[in-house]
Image (cartoon, grey):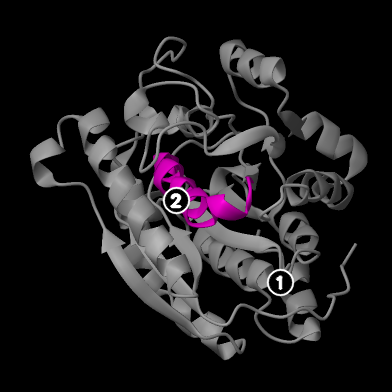
Amino acid sequence: MTQTRNKRQAPARIEIIGVRSGVGGRDPGAVGAVDSLRAAGLAERLQAGGLDARWGAMLQPTRSHAADPTAAMARLGPRLAQAVKDSIGRGAFPLVIGGDHSCAVGTWSGVAAATRAQGSLGLLWIDAHLDSHTPQTSHTGLIYGMPLAALLGHGDAAFTDCLVPGAKVLPQHVCVLGARSYEPEERALLDRIGVRVIGMEEIVRRGVTDALAEAAAIVRGAPVGYGITLDLDVIDPRDAPGVGTPAPGGVRAHELIDALAQIAFDPRLRGLEIAEYNPRRDRNGMTAAHALAIAEVVLGAGSGEALQRIARVAYA
């Protein structure tokens, strides 16, 4: 089903913040995501859609910590959080391009810090994985499996206390959409604290549009608005091979993009993050094309007809 776009006020200015980092994951290829999507014309595509979009800060781990991922991300996270907070302080809308998904700690710590005086932040976590391990439950010790837990206040203080101490989001204002590959320990944490998880089995039964509508209603309930962090591995690998941790049985790309058109541009949306693009694994730019289309649709670039046309395109 193609959504009819509501007439909404697009953000005055979009600041694209790049995170050149793959140190939090198993495959470091996500380090090339920022430069690849910049070369693919991300800012220009948004500009062609009538948005004032410009590249801003470019961040990466320090070389001295390259062999110690925890130390590297413990330093990079607050720098990213400050860049995001500063962007919002300048009146811009932050679009963060990762990097592996451990960058989410910095991104949403920054948004939460910038808006905390107005209330708590909602977060829509679109991902094939739950990313909700702590150092005590992780099977691998990899940081990209821990960012959602950290944002909820669980895990290593190096991440839970990014920029400001404590949880950045509350469980009742968080929803995970698209999960299909995770360990029981991380699902147990989210169930225990009350985070709604809409997994792939439920999405197949209900349809992407209906599932996303429920997820959006949950996160929109937060007083200050909400953010969206999208790991491209939520898309089925047939459509998006260019990710570090592909998981079979995901959302087809055209169905996800079509469903996301219902959000464009929601005035309660406070930030967007697209993570885990791995250009080394991509084929013919398929995954990059989806990343660009997702940014256009969520941010409301172009006319309603153009958004609907983007949403109908399947790159399989």
Is the residue 54 above or below the residue 169 in the image? below
Residue 248 visible, this orientation: no
Magenta-colored stretch includes residue 247: no
Q: Is residue 73 left or right of residue 11?
A: left
Which residue is located at x 66 percent, y 58 percent?
316
User: Who's the residue at 53% across and 87% down the image?
Assistant: 47
Task: Quadrant for the N terminus, please.
Answer: bottom right
| Amino acid type, callout 2 | Thr
Q: Residue at x 61, y 26 (%)?
A: 181
Q: Which stretch appears magenta?
A: 101-120
Label 1's element?
Answer: loop
**Residue furthest toward the front?**
117
Which residue bears the numbered disc 1? 265
- Disc 2 designates what residue? 107
Give neighbour class at mark 1: few <14, some 14-19, many 20+ (Cα, 10 Å): many
Q: Position of residue 49 (x, y in %)?
A: 62, 86
